Structures are given as structure tokens and as C-alpha cells.
Image (cartoon, rainbow, N blue to C red):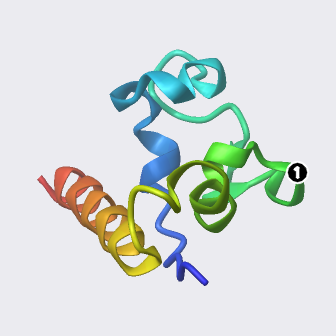
Amino acid sequence: MFVCNQCGECCRNLDKSEIYRKLDRGDGICVYLEKNKCSIYDNRPLFCRVDDCYKKYFQSKYTLEEFYRLNYQVCEKLQKIKGG
């Protein structure tokens, strides 16, 4: 299972990926982000669920470990952007 540290940076940088355009409230932040938590967490879109997204779209392209590594790399990069 993908372990999220719940920093919320993926939800604050939607403008960096076209697939999240419909969730962007206009400033790169997800319309469902409230107090650093997803207000629709149990019903969030598939592409917001790392494990389910892997199973549906990426298991033929990456091993699960590679997919996690790539996701963690993006997470770290977004956290560094926040830190300046």
C-alpha cells in the first residue's frame, strides 16, 4: 500500500498536470481540499488513488515498487517547491 504522509502538496499543485484540471479551483488547489484533508477522500477520483490507479493503468508498464518510487519522487519534488 502506498504510504502518504498527508502533506497535501499533491492537492495544491494540480496546475502541474492536465489530468487534474477539473479538480483545480483556479489557483492549482483542489476544490475538495479542506484543512489539508480531502473532503471526498472515500469517493475521490481514481487518479487520486495511487494503488487503484496502478492496478488499472500502470501495472503492465511498471512494477509496483517502481510506480511507488516514481510517486514518492514527485511527492518529494512538490514538497521542495513549497520549501523554496
Q: Amino acid at mark 1?
A: Asn
Image quarter in which the N terminus is found: bottom right
Mark 1 is surrounded, within 10 Å at the Cα level, by few (under 14), some (14 to 19) or many (20 or more) other residues, namely few
Residue 16 lies, with reference to residue 58, above or below; the image says above
User: Where in the figure is residue 80, as x and y percent of width and height?
Assistant: 18, 60
Query: Disc 1 on helix, strand or loop?
Result: helix
Quickly name the residue at label 1: 43
Q: Is residue 40 left or right of residue 56?
A: right
Q: Is 3 left, or right, of 65 in this rendering?
A: right
Q: Residue at x 41, y 73 (%)?
A: 63
User: Which residue is the extreme one toward the left?
Assistant: 84
Name the residue at 55% across, 29% down: 20
Which residue occupies the foreground of this view, 2 or 53? 53
Q: Is 41 placed left or right of 76 in the picture?
A: right
Quadrant of the image occupied by residue 38: bottom right
Image coordinates of residue 81 in percent, x first then y, are 19, 50
